Image (cartoon, rainbow, N blue to C red):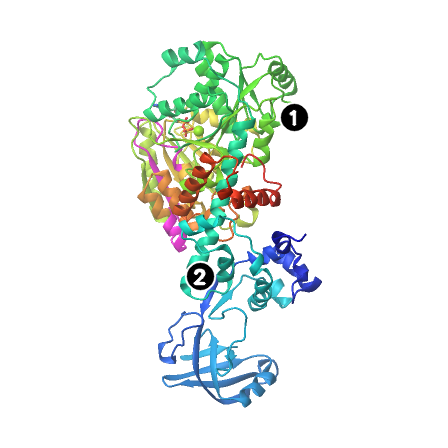
Amino acid sequence: MITETDILQTPIEYLKGVGPKRAEVLRKEFGICTYRDLLTYYPYRHIDKTHVYKVRDIVENGGYIQLRGTISNVQVIGQQRAKRLTAVFRDDTGTLELVWFNSLKWVEEMLQKRQDYIIFGKPTLFNGRWNMTHPEMIDPTVQSTSAVPMNFMPLYNTSDMAKKKTLDSKAISKLVTNLLPVVKDVIPETLSDRMVQELKLMPLKEAYCNIHYPASSQHLARAALRLKFDELFFTQMKLLSLKLINIQTIKGHLFSKVGDYFNNFYKHYVPFELTNAQKRVIKEIRADVGSGRQMNRLLQGDVGSGKTIIALFIMLLAKDNHYQSCLMAPTEILATQHFEKISKQVAPLGLRVEFLSGTTKTAKRRQILEGLQNGDVDILIGTHALIEDNVIFNNLGLVVIDEQHRFGVEQRAKLWRKNTTPPHILVMTATPIPRTLAMTLYGDLDISVIDELPQGRKPIITKHLYDKDRLALYGFLKKQIAAGRQVFIVYPLIKESEKLDLLDLQAGYEAIQRDFPEPEFGIGMVHGRMSAEDKDFEMQRFAKNQSQILLSTTVIEVGIDVPNATVMVIENAERFGLSQLHQLRGRVGRGGNQSYCILMSKYELSSEGKQRLNAMVSTTDGFEIANFDLKLRGPGDIQGTQQSGMLDFKIADLSKDEQLVAYTRKLAMQILDNDPALSQPEHQRIAVTLREIMKREKNWTRIS
Ligand code: ADP
Ligand code: MG
């Protein structure tokens, strides 16, 4: 039996007008392999053909328009390769020149047959005259015989390669007109009729037709809404039902006891009062790990909000319940810093904390691995090295991943497998992810937010300066250093090709050495090409205030904590993305002293560059910055989301469809709450659709 979906799965080469050669191009260039793929290859824009313009009304950059009038003065001019055909188009308000560079003969014959035309194209101004090249010429007496409405012409993204093989936008739209009549009646509805009605959605069938060839602009809008709805709704259904499956099938390690380690530390060794937000988050996590379910939680908190101490508390809770924990950080510098701080903090409690990275010496490594296996090591801190297969725990109960966006899906999955029952997972990120993005990217995780900074932090003052201000800047730095403070100076990453136009780190180092002579000033430098030991040495020197100025590339971006540093100077700031700038700025303002972020840039900035720097100057709120970034660049560029494949929406746009994301998530929750197995007749179609989606996306792992 041929089912409805089988038809949508038909290989594209069977479509009228395709064949094996074009099928190959479609597959290679656009990933279109089946009827469904073409059906969901949506146009990026439509041209309104319902409106006939007058020459008088043409404006510059007005895009494609349609005009009606007569043709005269047809002539071929120029020689050889410069040969072209021109004609004058006239309506009752003015004239326009038409130009053709190829198919001259064919066009000439066509123009001889009749004078009266509807023309369609994009007017441009050339030598003070309106001009249109290669207009589409429509005979106004011929009625459209097409099976689909042609009022709005769809425009499809194409590629040079595809165009060479005659697959331009027009050809693709032709293929779609061949496809629609074939599939129209078999497109399955994904929601019950009642839901479609109650939610006032366009039926899916109509939506697919109208997204390509809308009957009106209202139809187009409703079609887009319906298709966005489906994309977002089923993404949420997928995420939430996976979460449900986890809850039902995975028994979590039970941290039932709050014991001496946790309590002692809390009462005697925390050097400050926890913020209310920190207390709340610890409670949320305790409820999770004490529930008998496996925790999968994302902890979001702006830079400096104090996430590390929370991780430590939960690690102590693990110890109280006879479990081991590990903390993984994305860079050696950051992992080292965590190790040093945490070992010091828990020293009075008598825990064994170890550090493991790629540079750990063999003998030491053997010792650590042994300690892990026999359960002597309580807390393991390190880099990617923790993931390796030979790192075997005795009883791992908790995994903390810091600065989560640096890790890929695979790596996280490996950590799950480090105990027969997967450990609790706490993922910490300082990249403020806008809500909609978080709901999607981490839709199967629970989210905790620290929305409060520790007391007494003064907002960082941010200034945008140019080269001419450099002397004044240096004067300011000297004053800060004289007051006992320290300074970061960060340069963009050095790429060979960009070496020439970049104020590179080395040159910067020499310049700083001239203006800040030793021994009065200590200057350090770190960059990615240094060995881990050298980097660590320089970091330590800075942390101990033996150097006052630290020049670096972005290796210091994540997590570094030197509370005495109060100035962050970012050179060529226009070359950094917003979230990166925000991360860098977060390296200062961590102590009680007023801190500053100085953005140095060249004079000519792109408008986007200018907007980014302005945003930095105008707010220190990470979430505001993240939202701004999302609007400026779109979700695909947000750090760490590229490889996830979670954001490959065909029509929904997380930066614009915020409300729809929230709405569909709520709806999906309601449905799963009262019918977790989707067994009610009302949810039949949803269940079927969900199964199909899961089948199509086999490689979708259970941790997003
Ligand atoms: P992040 O959330 O960026 O990882 P950290 O955990 O590194 O932040 O904390 C930043 C700094 O603030 C650290 O020096 C830490 O000791 C300190 N800190 C954390 N919580 C508090 C608090 N409640 N009061 C004062 N200082 C705190
Ligand atoms: Mg941190």
Whole-Å distance between the Cαs marked 2 and 1?
Answer: 53 Å
| Residue 583 horizontal/vertical position (percent) | 42, 37
Q: Is residue 502 left or right of residue 474?
A: right
Residue corresponding to mark 1: 389
Which mark is in front, 2 or 1? 2
The front one of 249 and 434 is 249
Give the number of callouts. Answer: 2
Q: Which residues are magenta?
A: 585-612
Residue 244 part of the magenta-drawn span? no
Q: Label 1: how many residues lie within 10 Å, few (<14), some (14-19) or many (20+)?
A: few
Q: Can residue 351 be seen in this snapshot?
A: yes
The answer to whether the residue labelled 2 contacts the one labelled 1, judged by CB atoms less than 8 Å apart, is: no
Q: Is residue 349 left or right of residue 185?
A: left
The front one of 689 and 304 is 689
Residue corresponding to mark 2: 220
| Residue 187 horizontal/vertical position (percent) | 56, 55
For ligand 2, which image quadrant applies?
A: top left
SS for callout 1: loop
